[in-house]
Amino acid sequence: MVNTGRFVILVLAYRFLSYVVYMGSSPSSGGGGDPEAVRAGHLEMLSSVASSGGGEQGSRAALTHSYHHAFEGFAAALTEEEAAALAAHERVVSVFKDRALQLHTTRSWDFLEVQSGLSSGRLGHRARASGDVIVGVIDTGVWPESPSFDDAGMPEVPGRWRGVCMEGPDFNKTSCNRKLIGARYYGVQPDTSSPNAAGSGSPRDTVGHGTHTASTAGGAVVSGAGYYGLAAGDARGGAPGSRVAVYRACSMGGCASSAVLKAVDDAVGDGVDVVSISIGMGSAFQSDFLADPIALGALHAHARGVLVVCSGGNDGPGPYTVVNSAPWIITVAASSIDRSFQSNVVLGNGNVVKGVAINLSNQSLSGGKYPLVSGAEAAARYAPVAEASNCYPGSLDAEKVRRKIVVCVGTDPTVSRRVKKLVAEGSGAKGLVLVDDAEKDVPFVAGGFAFSQVGTDAGAQILEYINATKNPTAVILPTEDVRDFKPAPVVASFSARGPGMAESVLKPDLMAPGVSILAATIPSADTEDVPPGKKPSAYAIKSGTSMACPHVAGAAAFVKSAHPGWTPSMIRSALMTTATTTNNLGKPVASSNGAAANGHDMGAGEVSPLRALSPGLVFDTTAHDYLRFLCYYGYKEGIVRKVSGDAGFSCPAGAPSPDLAAAAVNYPSISVPRLRRGGKAAVTVTRTAINVGAENATYAAAVEAPPGVTVRVKPDRLVFNKRWTTARYEVSFEVADGAGVSKGYAHGAVTWSDGAHSVRTPFAVNVV
């Protein structure tokens, strides 16, 4: 026993884990360095700390990724002692474990066009001109045979493209074309140095997530798309004339952070213009910016002129749940569109109860009705009634629910809708009615099984009918899609909310369609949502901020095609300041709880690609702004200097001071993390606007101030004599003593208008 214990201790002492070693900017990160020389330098560093010998061959085996395009660093299998030794190296900024990141359209683009109030013909004209814009999608890969990646009519690939089309057992160079111009894959998962742990060595998508996001961002126009008769119409991406490059860094089990960082580095080196990343950490496990692979990659991508768009996460609706919230990232929330998928329940007494779901069952009124039973009445022997009522696994008596429609409630959020559906289906039920207000705004895809979700009031009506009827019956009707649904958009219940990790930056930035989005998928024959007797669909309906993110990436590519000289932050500014904040009833956009949405719910509002083409004014945020932000946030000057690669960089006087970070970044929104009461406690934030509109223009400021908060803009008029000139202004916030303002965040906006443009910049102030 003693020897065994010693042996275990020795094994643990030399356990290798995957780490990322980040070294900031370097001369080679400008693109002119020799990749082999950089890699050799990384191998030399590894050899210098190797605890078990092995020489150069051992170091080569340990090295899994070498980063050298946008920044410098590497990923390697290390012991804790080796990681600590590298962290102390003078060239190293940070060393962190290679963690697992999680994966977070016919009608949606039409809806955004309608909401813009502008002519859709303009969109078609601009979209055809977007062939030189390249969108990189970091996800689970691509299904290249999808019609969404057809290159018919597209010109030759831009000469500046430097990427590759990697081959694999199921992926050839011919899988790429003039639309899908590049494909890479990465095969290392967290906590292992074993290559290809993510699955097959190929860019081919085996999950469907990557194909869905890539086609949403830049898919070609496909007529007659749909999902088994639902959501029928023309599918297209936000910039259907753009090129798409995919980077498979994820599998069903998640994404290695080292692989995601390598994908960002490669995408920048390949020459993409926009990167779409529908991936992130859980909100409970966020790390600081210089140990976050997505934040690190995006920071250097921005410095190289590449815009990075990320999903904000699906941990809503609670506050402080938004992820990917670095100021150099466009962080996207999710909203509904004006389409609803209704699956109604017809009771035996003729009453119709409205429900939502995506089910393709064969139940109909002409086929008769099925016996109706509540889960509580169908409890298995020894199963608590409360568990049976919730459709817990193993809680239902198969004899009591066979060939019946079972009614379950959703009082326990730990049992998902999918699990409840599998429990009912596995017990022999003919259908499931779920009584639950949670997630009712996001229709569950139930395939061929009859399923409908109703709210608690409607559920009470159904349960009352069961209790008052000797032989209750019902039928669940197949789903119908209802267009022009109102109100829309609404912030999705799952969409993560701000404030973000740095409260001096208002997050999320924007909102985009992320509920029940139709886009391309993989034709998997064994998926449970394929109805009996049907072939796998080439398109799928999915929900999540994963779906919202590529909408903004596509919109960014669309704006880039019209303004190829604009910087990433100018494009972000155009998208944010022209976003819409009213729904299709002309009222303020609501959150999922029915209250008016604020900046922490939806950012600047719902993205409007057409309006973003002509924003009037833009706010350009420089790389120097972001470095100053890091100083104010609390990073030491020496660390920020390594990040920048500028040996002469100095942090501003007064840093660190997180409260001042709001003024350090020329952002198209404002967040004041602490606003104290009293005249001497006023907070002033400066912004600089660039005129990209008319030659001679005068903009006047209008303020939407929350009650009790005094907001002053100085000057309140901006005069421009020509384009590309700048104007600086200040916004001050003050809460008087005795104003009766409650503690916590209050929201408002400053809007600049010249009569033709409305440039809206939202703000949030935290009264303490």
Image (cartoon, rainbow, N blue to C red):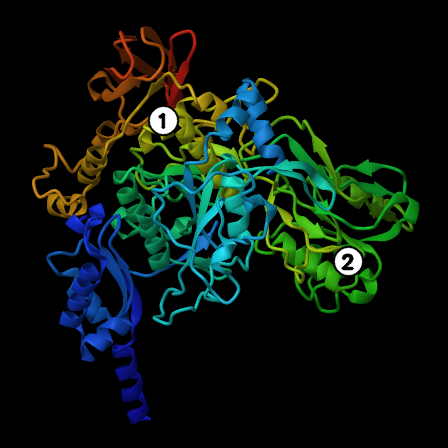
Residue at x 42% of width, y 7% of height: 755
Q: In this orientation, which residue lies closer to the viewer: 413 or 676?
A: 413
Residue at x 58% of width, y 53% of height: 145
Q: Amino acid at mark 2?
A: Pro
| Residue 510 in sight here | no
> In the rendering, at what x and y percent does residue 328 appear?
31, 37
Left or right: residue 317 versus residue 711 is right
Q: Amino acid at mark 1?
A: Ser
Residue 39, image quadrant:
bottom left
Residue at x 53% of width, y 31% of height: 591
> In the rendering, at what x and y percent does residue 304 appear?
27, 40
State which quarter of the image contains the N terminus. Answer: bottom left
Comes first in the chain, label 2 or label 1: 2
> In the rendering, at what x and y percent does residue 121 appear?
57, 21
Q: What is the spatial separation of the Cα atoms under label 2 and label 1, in whole angstroms? A: 48 Å
* Rendered image: mark on residue 532: 2
> In the rendering, at what x and y percent does residue 225 appear?
67, 41
- The answer to the question of whether label 2 and label 1 lie on touching residues, with beta carbons closer than 8 A, is no
